[in-house]
Amino acid sequence: MSSTRQSQTPSACIVPRGGDHCDFCSTPPVFKVYRCANFVAKGRPVFAKGVAAGSWAACRKCAELVDQGKWNDLTQRAVRKFVKRHRVARDEVAGVRAQLAEISRSFALNKIGTAHPAAKNVQDVQGI
Ligand SMILES: [Zn+2]
């Protein structure tokens, strides 16, 4: 019997879903939690519908990448972990990468506040 193989859309697993693991790469434990405005990924809000903002957990490594603004590295890491975890077929990896890149980008745009302690230097540079 052949059942139609529903392509397992990995997108559903990417968004924050609580628990003690990273929302980017699913690695436990959570090291840092970011405030993030709700945004839409793949046509669905990442947090509950109608919620303005939510918490986005990150493991130590991902938090480092977020704080350094290394979004490409963050995406690469998330893709690597995701592919390993979900046994994504080779020809689907590009699609997963595109999704995760979009998520990283949206997260970067919607992140509320900053955990970066170097903010003082910005004022110095602007010479107020
Ligand atoms: Zn992580």
Image: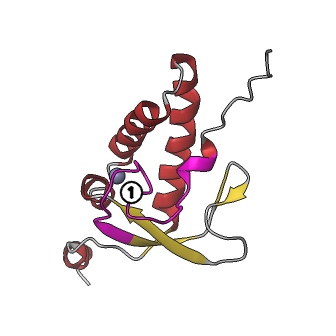
- Whole-percent x and y of residue 72? 38, 41
Mark 1 surroundings within 10 Å by alpha-carbon count, few (fewer than 14), some (14 through 19), many (20 or more): many
The percent position of residue 107, horizontal first and vertical second, equals 49, 59
Q: Quadrant of residue 77?
A: top left
Q: Position of residue 33 (x, y in %)?
A: 37, 71
Pick whichever, 113 or 58, lies toward us: 58
The picture places residue 41, in percent across and down from the top left corner, at 64, 53
Name the residue at 28% across, 65% down. 31
Quadrant location of the C terminus in the rendered image? bottom left
- Residue behind label 1 places its C-beta within 8 angstroms of ligand 1: yes
Residue carrying label 1? 22
Q: Find numbered disc 1 in the image and state the secondary structure of the residue it sits on.
A: loop
The amino acid type found where label 1 is placed reads: Cys
User: Measured along the vertical axis of the image, is residue 76 above or below residue 49?
Assistant: above
The type of colouring in the image is secondary structure
Residue placed at 25% from the left, 75% from the top? Answer: 119
Question: As rendered, which of 113 and 60 lies closer to the eye?
Answer: 60
Figure check: 45 above or below 77? below
Question: Is 23 in the magenta?
Answer: yes
Magenta span includes 68: no
Tell me the quadrant of the picture where the N terminus can be found: top right
- The part of the chain drawn in magenta is 12-33
